[in-house]
Amino acid sequence: MKLYNTLTKQIEEFIPFEEKKVKMYTCGPTVYHYAHIGNLRTYIFEDILEKGLSYLGYEVIRAMNITDVGHLTSDSDTGEDKMIKGAKREGKTVYEIADFYTNAFLSDMKDLNLKIPKIIEKASAHIDTYIKMIQKMLDEDYAYISNGNVYFDISKANDYYKLSGKNKDDLLIGVRDTVDEDKAKRNPADFVLWFTLSKFENQVMKWDSPWGVGYPGWHIECSGISYLTLGEYLDIHCGGVDNIFPHHTNEIAQSEAYLGHKWCNYWCHGAHLNDQTGKMSKSNGEFLTISLLKEKGYSPLDYKYFCLNSHYRNSLVFSFESLDTAKIAYSKLKNKVLSLEKEGEIDGTAISKYTKKFKDALENDLNTSLMLTVIYDVLKDENLNDATKFKIIKDFDKVLSLDLTKEEKKSISAELEQEIIEKIELRKNAKKNKDFATADSIRDELLQKGIKLIDSREGTTYEIV
Ligand code: AMP
Ligand code: ZN
């Protein structure tokens, strides 16, 4: 498997610490609002990576956090706490907000056929781990207390800028733009490990610590949960490109300071989904969600197909026109696969040939559009019988999870269901009164609507035809 590694800035052969076993960490959602479809593009790429590795025979253990505490609106040490902002907006407690949007996120994942990681941990559930890590960093002088907060001293980190590839001066400009200059810091890019000096007087989530009542900074939660659930060595860490700085840069600094050695070998980042006006963002007010796409008549898998047509490292511009094109192509593809005869002799040589092509695309830094092309090649191959085509595509769909071989369950609207129940009752009464003409016309009327009535000794049921 070859992957682009943000740390080394090149495509590299992936070699895990333990043979055929992968420890993978993916930054999870901040649950103060729905995930927008841009966020979900990142989770789609991570899911392909996880399933792709499993397809290639690796055992993958993946962990993800749920950020329910300490995430600030300006990814630095200022701004409003996102959870408090969500609670104020909806007149709920931060705990209710966290629960509601965690469930909404898991439901989006399910709609997109994304595997829920084996390990999912709430940031607020591991305060003791962060405290233990911060104390060690204080004891070893990587951290310092200033004006009530605990800060990480970036000048003590081993090559602090190695992930972002920027330098101190570049970052100083960015830092000045986003951070009210905090006089308590030794270096402008130092970041908070533990807040005691709350910027928010109404902060609800707070805990005792050796440094006073407070709450953890955002970055320490991922280092803490990764260490706690996956141990001292991590193979792959993922997120969107916006996470490279400061979040992942700070994760590396504090994890390596705490552990005393290199922590994670491969850093994989997904490029952004933008709308025509620029970056998609939840703080912009209106944003696109999976529920909104569903309301507009798109299936979540139309959107997933749209994403898989481009490479995860290329930024992608969303428009409804492009989604329409993807919807039509996806529907044609699925119909074509479903029309294949499933029974027949299987051509093992063809399976090996196409599986190799598919694996080559997968192993080439997750080339999903090429993986889709292999599916089209299989469908077009005149030397292959239907059963072989169906078997190959079913196998590839273990990675793509586009439900290509899954028959849709037919469903009806709630109104039609109510009408059927009422008509079955009318028909029952008509039969009781020996009015067979009415009973038959009700049956025929429903059949016109695609509903077949089935009479049995137990009563009448129906089938969608
Ligand atoms: P958040 O819930 O804001 O912490 O973000 C969840 C994930 O979505 C992170 O991995 C981000 O890097 C990623 N992300 C944020 N905005 C976008 C975007 N416009 N396109 C793709 N991924 C994004
Ligand atoms: Zn993270």
Image (tube, rainbow, N blue to C red):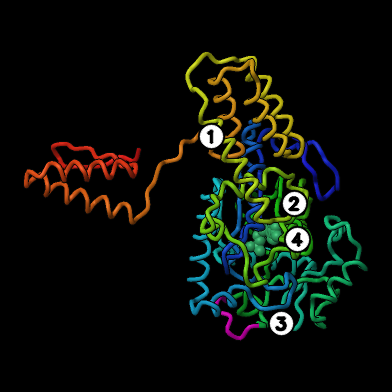
Separation (CA) of disc 4 from disc 3: 29 Å
Q: Main secondary structure of the magenta part?
A: loop
User: Relative to 410, is 160 above or below?
Assistant: below
Q: Does any atom of ligand 1 lie closer than 8 Å to the CB of label 4?
A: yes
Comparing marks 1 and 4, which lies closer to the viewer?
1
| Kind of residue sitting beneath label 2 | His
**Would residue 171 be visible to someone looking at this image?**
yes
User: Relative to 165, is 361 above or below?
Assistant: above
- The answer to which of marks 2 and 4 sits earlier in the sequence is 4
Circle 2 crowding by C-alpha within 10 Å: few under 14, some 14–19, many from 20:
many
Separation (CA) of disc 1 from disc 3: 63 Å
Circle 1 crowding by C-alpha within 10 Å: few under 14, some 14–19, many from 20:
some
Residue 269 disc label:
2
Quarter of the rendering containing residue 319? bottom right
- Which quadrant: the C terminus? top left
Q: Going by the picture, which residue comes out furthest to the right?
A: 169
Magenta-tinted stretch = 200-206
- The answer to which of marks 1 and 2 sits earlier in the sequence is 2
Residue 191 on image: x %, y %: 77, 71
Horizontal arrangement in the rendering, residue 117 relative to residue 408 (left or right): right
Quarter of the rendering containing residue 363? top right
- The answer to which of marks 4 and 3 sits earlier in the sequence is 3
Q: Residue at x 64, y 34 (%)?
A: 58
